[in-house]
Image (cartoon, helix red, strand yellow):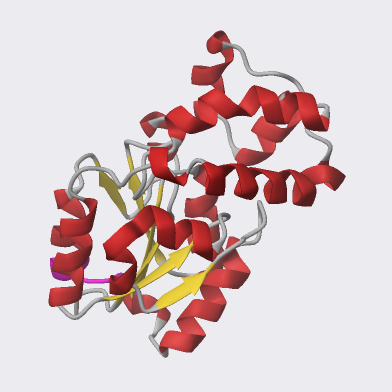
Amino acid sequence: MPYSLAIFDLDGTLVDSFPWFLRTINDVADRFGFRRVSDEDVEGLRHASTREILSRLEVPVWRLPAIARYARRLKGEAAAEISLFAGAEAMLQTLTENGVQLALVTSDSEDNARAKLGDAASLFQYFDCAASVFGKPAKFRRVIRRAGIEPSKVISIGDEVRDIEAARAVGIACGAVSWGYAAPAALQALAPDHMFTQMDEIADAVCRTPAKA
């Protein structure tokens, strides 16, 4: 059987927010007292895990909730300049037409997510937003319970190491996209069930590839 539920990440997976992130990160760093990111730092950070990134930038862990709230506010203000990747809406429409339920689990707010998705937001049955840095496993479990789908028929699709780790923590398949925040090599090193290099590959895999038990 193909997958019955696809849980998507937002930033770097469906919407092209990395340019905005690079323009904004040092303002956030100055406000919250962690290391600024130079142009030379970017590629190394794309190859690092989330924990490694926090360590390298000396981010105070106790400030993560406040940093996340501030980032969500900035994203809301910049929603007009953050757009869907080419082909994303068509891919989501294809999944829906093939009977796949869609869920969105993101660190962003639901209002921001809906604004960035635009008309494509109506294709999603489930939103579970404002995930903490390491809070996706709990949100995945909640979405799966709400959908009433067996984990073997669920796939999570994201662009970061932590997305793969979260899927593995709850026993669902994972797909990684090569066009997001993390470097493709960093994702491939974790051997995701599917590695996507083009948007149109997602529908083929989700609708036609047997889920792993």
**Nearer to me, 182 or 65:** 65
Q: Quadrant of residue 19?
A: top left
Q: Give the left or right position of residue 49, taking residue 149 as reference.
A: right
- Confirm whether the magenta stretch covers residue 207: yes
| Residue visible at 71% across and 34% down in the picture | 54
Residue 198 visible, this orientation: yes
21, above or below 41, in the image: below
| Residue 205 at x, y percent in the picture | 18, 60
Residue 187 placed where, x, y %?
42, 39
Extent of the magenta region:
206-213
Residue at position x 19%, y 69% in the image: 95
Outermost bottom residue: 148
Q: Position of residue 120 (x, y in %)?
A: 28, 63
Q: Residue 125 magenta-drawn?
A: no
Q: Is residue 100 above or below residue 61?
A: below
Q: Residue at 62% of width from left, 71% of height from top?
A: 138
Work out whether residue 209 can be spotted.
Answer: no
- The residue under the point 22% across, 57% down is 89
Assign the C terminus to one quadrant of the image: bottom left
Please tell me in which quadrant of the rendered image residue 96 appears. Answer: bottom left
**Residue 25, position as x, y percentages in the image:** 62, 28
